[in-house]
Amino acid sequence: MRVRTAIAAMSAAAILLPAAAHASGSVAAPPPDSEFQKVTLNDNPGEPMDLAVLPDSRVLHTTRRGEVWLHDPKTGLNTLAARLDVYRHDEEGLQSIALGPGFGTGSKKDDWVYLYYSPPLDTPVDDPATPDVNEGDAPVTGTPADFAPFKGLIRLSRFRFTGATIDLRTEQRILDVPVDRGICCHVGGDIVFDAAGNLYLSTGDDTNPFSSDGYAPLDERSDRNPAFDAQRSAGNTNDLRGKILRVKVRADGSYTIPRGNLFPPGTAGTRPEIYAMGLRNPFRIELNRSNGDLYVADYSPDARDANPQRGPAGTGKWTKIRKAGNYGWPYCATARLPYVDYDFATGTSGNAFACAAPVNDSPHNTGLRKLPPVVQPDVWYSYGPSQEFPQLGTGGIGPMAGPAYDYDPRAAHGRTAVAWPRYYDGVPLFYEWTRDYVKAFHPDGRIEDVLPSLVFDNPMDMEFGPDGALYVLEYGDGYFQENPDAQLSRFDYIGNTGNHTPVPAAAASVTAGHAPLTVNFTSAGTTDADGDRIRYAWDFDADGRVDSRSPQASYTYRQNGLYNATLRVTDDAGRSAATSVRIVVGNAAPVVELVRPAEGQTFTFGDAVEFEVRVTDDQPVDCANVTVDYILGHDEHGHPQTTARGCTGSIQTTVPSGHDPETDHLTGVFVATYTDPGGADLPPLTGSDEVILQPTR
C-alpha cells in the first residue's frame, strides 16, 4: 500500500484550515447522499459498546453487560458468540473487542479475539438485604484501609475464535489496568493494531469529575478518595490510566515493549508500556495501517465557560499521533489552554500550569515529578462555535476518532458491490457521539460533512469492512440499556449501480408461548426503493434451511428455546438483506416496571430517592437479581453513578458541582433491569424499565 498524504501536524504555522482557505483551488464535490444506503443488520444489539468486522464481513460486537454478538450477513442471523461474567458499577463491564493482526490468515494461531473487560473479582456489591445501604459504593472520604476493598482492575485478554463462538477457556491474560472501583468515571478503552502487529490500548483516567466544578479534578486532600485526583492516573508516568499503551504480544500472551514508547524500559518512576499520556477519556482510537497514523479523540470536562480562577471551558480534542508524547491532562486542555492550580481544601486558586514543563506534585503521584511538555492537538473545540473549526458546529462534546478509508478497486465493482468510492481514500473520519454526525478530515485541511441526510444515532463505533462498506454501532437515545434506536448498521455505496438493497420487514402473530406454539408470520412493510421484484426466504428455526418462500407463512415450534425467525429478501440484481423476529418458546421475557420513582418526578440533587421495582415473569422472581442504576443525565448522554440491588431500596443521588441544572439540562435517570434464570433449553431473558426525574429549579 502506498503512504497517504496526511493532515499536517498541528503547530503555530500549520493547522487544519477551514475549507474557505482553499477557495483558490478547485475541490471535487463529495458523492451525493442519494448514492448511499443505510442497512440495519441487528436492531436488538443490547447496550452496544464496540465492534469488529471479520474478513468474511461477519461482525462481532460487544455489550456492556458482557455479551459478544455475531452477525452473519449470509443468514441474517445474530447469535451469541460469548457471554462474560463482568463487574458492573458505574461505567464498568465489557468494553472493547478487536481481531488479532493476523486474524483470518488460515492458521488457528492467528484466530485471536481481544477483549477489554472488568472481571468481577471480590469487589463489594450492593446487598439487597440492606435496602438503605449500598455496599457497592466506595466511600468518598476515609482512610486507605477504607478504600482498599475497591481496588480492582480492567483486563486485556485474548481468546480463540472457533468459527461462530469465542472459547472463553482459551483465555490468555495480557495486561491488567488497575482501577478504583465503586465510583464513577472514565474506565473505557479501545484496541487497535498497527502494520507491525503492535497493540495499542487506550485507557480512561478513572477519575470522578463531579466535584471539580467542571474543571480539572486535582483534589489532594488526605482523607479524600484518590479517585478525585487525576494526577494519580493520567498525569502519573508510573500508572497505566489516562494513556495510550503500546505493546507487542508474544505467542504465550506475554508482551515486549516496542522501540519509541514515551519512556525507555528501566526508566525509574515510569511504565514502559506508555506511548501517549495526559488523556482524560480517549474512548475511541483508530490506526491507519497504510501510514502508521494513530487517530485519538479525547473527551473533556463539563465547564460551559472559561474561568480565570480555574481554567478553560470543556474542550474536546482530536489528534493524529506519530510519535510518543504528553497531551496535558489534567494540567492542560491543550498546549495553549492551561488549567489553574486549585486547592480543594481551602477553595483558593494558584497559578496556571506551565504546559511547556508541567510538574506533578500530587501526593498521589508515584511517578516522575517533571513531565514531558504538552503536545498541541490537531483539532479542538468547545460547546459554542469554534473560531478555528466552525465546521464542527455547536452542542455537546463527545469526540470519537473514526477510521481512514482504504480504497480497494477490487471491492468496488460488481452487481452487489457496496464499497465506498475513491473520493474517501485515505481520509480519516471523525464522529461526534452527542451531535449525531460524521465529518471527513481531508488531507488538504477541509472538514466536510459525511452523509448528513442519513442518520447516525449516537454513533458508538465504526469500522470499514473488507467489502468497503462502513459498519456502525449506534447507541441510540437513552441510558445504559438497549435503547429503542440502538442498532448495528451498514452504510453502503450504491453509486456504481444505482440499485438499492430491499428493506425487509417481518412480524409475528405471537412472540412467546409454550410448545407446541404456532406462529403466523408476515412480511408486510417490506419495500424496495427501485420497485424491483422481491424474492422471500424464511428460516423459522435458524437451522440454515429455507422453510418458506411466501410473503406470509406459518410455523409450529415443538421444542422450547429462543428462536430468531429470519426473513431474507432479495431483488433481481442479487442485493439482499435480512431481518428477524425473536420467538421465545417455553420462557417469557420478564416485564420490569419502576413503580417508584415515577417518570417526570421532581427531586433535588443530593436527595435519597426510594425505588420500588415490580417484575412479572413466568418463573419465580428473585429480587436479589434486580439491579437499579442511577445515572446523572447530562444533555443527551449520562454518567452512571451507582448500582443498587433489590426490588426496593433507596439511592443517594449526587450533587454535581459546576453544573446548572437548567442550562446544563441535567436529569436523574433510573434504570431497573432483571434477568431471569432461563432453563435447561432456555436462555436467560432480560427486561428493563427507565424513568427520568427532573431536578427542582
Image (cartoon, rainbow, N blue to C red):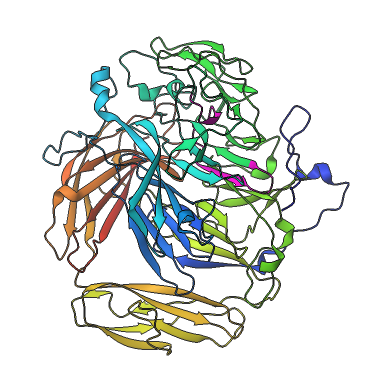
Residue 647 percent across, percent down from the top left = 16, 48
Q: Residue 285 lies in magenta, yes or no?
A: yes
- Image spot of residue 384 (x, y percent): 60, 37
x and y percentages locating residue 11 in the rendered image: 73, 29
Q: Quadrant location of residue 31?
A: bottom right
Question: Within the image, what quadrant is residue 87 found in?
Answer: top left
Q: Where is residue 57 in the image (x, y as percent from the top left)?
A: 53, 65
**Left or right relative to 538: residue 244:** right
Magenta region, residue range: 271-293
Q: Is residue 282 above or below residue 351?
A: below
Locate residue 559: give its quadrant. Answer: bottom left
Residue 416: tell me if it is visible.
yes
Left or right of 283: which side holds 323?
Answer: right
Residue 597 seen from this side:
no
Residue 153 versus residue 22 in the image, above or below: above
**The C terminus lies in which quarter of the figure?**
top left
